[in-house]
Image (tube, grey):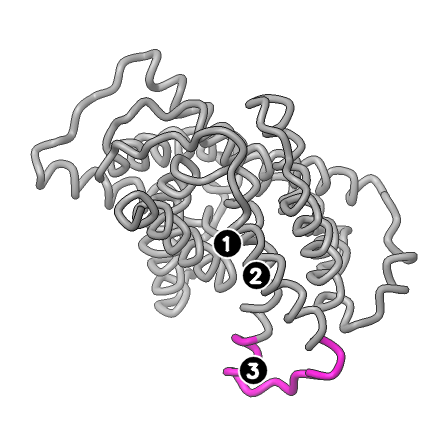
């Protein structure tokens, strides 16, 4: 029993670390540099193998949900407030569970459903500092609808990874997924890349981009894909409930005053919901993780 549970526990740890990285920054700013890191790693191990056209199509499909989310986010946040975006993002785990039920025919258990709803409410309590009445001000404007579509794409992310995984090394999978994402990003952003004044980029900004490449992009993709294969989609997505908690802790570490009396109930609710999501019995078998990276 211990040996059976250890890989699943390890997968939970990887997704938790992924969530921490996402809390610190968004993982798409340096996709090309991250892809090159994996190319170097595979080359050093003499494992760099060109995929077939079918596999390239599969890797492109795997990277599409995350790309769609970040494109929607960058466009929508020109008008959507960060508060609205945070509130809308709490729907991702529930959407992921519903999509998994339809696509993968995995029913949502009673405890899982209750944990998903409770996690949404608890995360909203943190975001709105204990005042859920502010939800009444949330309107589905054009930008909010676009961001919500991005959230749907993000909810599909673990499902697509799980369905498209074919047992290859996770280093290989992450490498070619990032390369496909880089090609698509380059095509979309080519005009702005050419117009950018790269000589004006300062050293701190280059260092920040390096962090995005090595940790927030490369490592997060690597961890997320491993977790998505080993865990249920709603379990992977449910870790997003922890993002407001981790952001609060980061703010506290940076010296910001945290209104604990306003957010304490929400934090407790998120932790309880996460505990239920981690330990809730699975409906059906969990696919065995075979790629070792």
In front: label 3 or label 1: 3
Is 73 on the left-hand or right-hand side of 167?
Answer: right
Position of the C terminus by quadrant: top left
Question: What residue is pinned by disc 3?
Answer: 252
Question: What residue is pinned by disc 2?
Answer: 242
Q: Which residue is at a point 17% across and 42% down the rendered structure image?
A: 40
Is the stretch drawn in magenta largely helix, strand or loop? Answer: helix
Q: CA distance from mark 2 to mark 3?
A: 15 Å
Query: Residue 266: which quarter of the image?
Result: bottom right
Q: Which residue is at a point 56% across and 45% down the rendered structure image?
A: 237
Give yes or no for residue 261 being in the magenta stretch.
yes
Residue 253 coordinates in the image, percent (x, y) = 50, 83
Q: Is residue 86 above or below residue 255?
A: above
| Residue 164 circle label | none
Q: Which secondary structure, mark 1?
A: loop
Is 236 on the left-hand or right-hand side of 273?
Answer: left
> Mark 1 touching mark 2, by CB under 8 A?
no
Q: Is residue 265 above or below residue 208?
A: below
Q: CA distance from mark 3 to mark 1?
A: 20 Å
Is 190 on the left-hand or right-hand side of 107?
Answer: left
Query: Residue 53: which quarter of the image?
Result: top left
In front: label 1 or label 2: 2
| Residue 26 circle label | 1
């Amino acid at each position: 029993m211990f040996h059976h549970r250890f890989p699943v526990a390890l997968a939970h740890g990887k997704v938790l670390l992924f969530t921490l990285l996402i809390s610190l920054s968004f993982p798409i700013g340096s996709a090309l540099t991250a892809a090159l890191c994996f190319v170097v790693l595979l080359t050093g191990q003499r494992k760099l193998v060109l995929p077939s056209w079918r596999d390239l199509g599969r890797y492109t499909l795997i990277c599409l949900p995350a790309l769609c989310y970040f494109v929607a986010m960058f466009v929508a946040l020109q008008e959507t407030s960060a508060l609205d975006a945070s509130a809308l993002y709490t729907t991702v785990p529930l959407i992921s569970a519903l999509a998994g039920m339809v696509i993968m025919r995995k029913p949502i258990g009673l405890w899982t459903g209750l944990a998903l709803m409770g996690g949404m409410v608890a995360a909203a309590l943190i975001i709105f500092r204990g005042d859920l009445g502010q939800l009444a001000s949330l309107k589905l404007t054009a930008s909010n609808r676009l961001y919500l579509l991005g959230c749907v794409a993000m909810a599909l992310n673990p499902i697509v990874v799980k369905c498209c995984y074919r047992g290859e090394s996770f280093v290989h999978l992450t490498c070619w997924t990032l390369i496909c994402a880089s090609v698509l990003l380059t095509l979309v952003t080519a005009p702005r890349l050419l117009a950018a004044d790269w000589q004006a980029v300062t050293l701190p900004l280059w260092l920040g981009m390096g962090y995005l490449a090595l940790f927030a992009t490369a490592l997060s993709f690597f961890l997320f894909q491993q977790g998505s294969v080993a865990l249920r989609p709603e379990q992977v997505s449910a870790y997003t409930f922890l993002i407001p908690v981790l952001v609060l802790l980061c703010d506290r570490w940076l010296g910001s005053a945290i209104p604990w009396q306003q957010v304490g109930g929400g934090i407790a609710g998120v932790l309880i919901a996460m505990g239920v999501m981690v330990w809730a019995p699975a409906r059906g078998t969990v696919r065995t993780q075979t790629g070792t990276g």
